[in-house]
Image (cartoon, grey):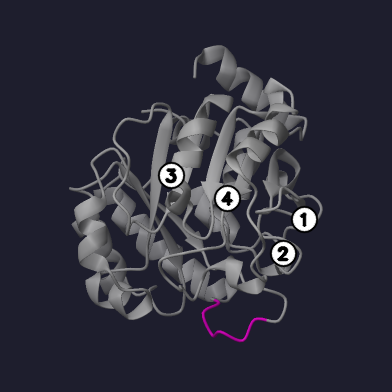
Amino acid sequence: MNAIDYINIWYRIVRRKPIGFSIDLTHRCTLSCQTCYMKWYQNQPEMSTEQWEKLLSSFPPSYRYYGAWTGGEPLLRAESIEKLIHLFKWNWVATNGTIPLPTTWRNVSFLVSIDGNQEIHDQQRGHWAEIVKNVRPDCFVIYDITTINCTEKILRETVDFWHKRCRGIIFGFYTPSLNDTSGLLLGPQERRATVEIIRKLKQEHPYFIVNSIKQLENCCTTPWSQNCPAGNCIVGLTAQGEFKNPCVMGSQVDCSKCGCAVPQFMYLVQRLDIPAILSSIRILSK
């Protein structure tokens, strides 16, 4: 990406125009995580690499600044991703880290999901040792905050462990389905208390924690709906290449309780918030 690309992305976000895709390349996965929104939907047949190439190429370049490859576990189709990443200026691969990460792909950031320190992570999804082995210094880790992993002890141990092993950590709050009964959802006051913990950690690791505090504070109070900037700017596609609405989480998401980091990044970028812009550039570059 160059300066012109970033300006164009900002302009399209302000105008609520698409800038990229979130592609559910597969519903298959190596794990079965509580917070995964794929559990809300039935498995679907997968499109071939050639079908994806034809579909994505049909959109103009202004829609294809970045592609986010998700699942399921997208690296189960690593050969397809390798053949398709050329369609985008930058790519994100959202992985659980149980499969070794390709080392030769250009213009790709790997985002590895973790659930806390080793004890909590292994309780929630397992395979901690494999993930630690596979994460590289150029990766980001992403952390979905729930009632189980929101304590200061767990957050501090997680940050202290990973800040020596990867580029940064991106926090978001668990976003439920409309009929959620998991007990994982934090209420607004609990979210605010968690933000105060992260505020202290960010003072110690200002560059490592990618989120701005303002962004996390917004996650405590903002009920999104049709006004969600992510829903406007990111085109979500199912494994069959169908559009997902209102956002990449699909029709069963409870927007009134959204804690996703992405719309808050975009909301602040729209308003020329410098920390949010710099954070976005970090994620869209090596």
Q: Mark 3 — residue?
A: 78
Q: Quadrant of residue 71?
A: bottom right
Please name whichever residue, 136 or 256, is drawn nearer the observer in this view of the structure: 136
Q: Please check the rendered image and state whether residue 184 is part of the magenta-colored stretch, yes or no.
A: yes
Q: Quadrant of residue 268?
A: top right
Instruction: Please say whether residue 264 is visible from this viewpoint.
Output: yes
**Badge 2 amino acid:** Cys
Residue 181: x and y in percent read 61, 86
Relative to 3, is 156 above or below?
below
Q: Mark 1 — residue?
A: 246
Tag 4's secondary structure? loop
Q: Quadrant of residue 8?
A: top right
Residue density around tag 3, few if under 14, some if 14–19, many if 20 or more, within 10 Å: some
Q: Nearer the viewer, mark 4 or mark 2?
A: 4
- Residue drawn at x 32%, y 59% is 98
- Which circle's residue, 4 or 2, is located before the other in the chain? 4
- Residue drawn at x 51%, y 79% is 184
Residue density around tag 1, few if under 14, some if 14–19, many if 20 or more, within 10 Å: many
Give the residues drawn in magenta, as a range: 180-185
Residue density around tag 4, few if under 14, some if 14–19, many if 20 or more, within 10 Å: many
State how far apart marks 4 and 3 are (Cα).
Answer: 10 Å
Residue 49: x and y in percent read 58, 40
- Which circle's residue, 1 or 2, is located before the other in the chain? 1
Task: Decide if residue 153 is on the left or right side of residue 24.
Answer: left
Q: Mark 2 — residue?
A: 255
Residue furthest to the right in view is 226
Tag 1's secondary structure? loop
- Which circle's residue, 1 or 3, is located before the other in the chain? 3
Task: Decide if residue 157 is on the left or right side of residue 104.
Answer: left
Q: Quadrant of the C terminus?
A: top left
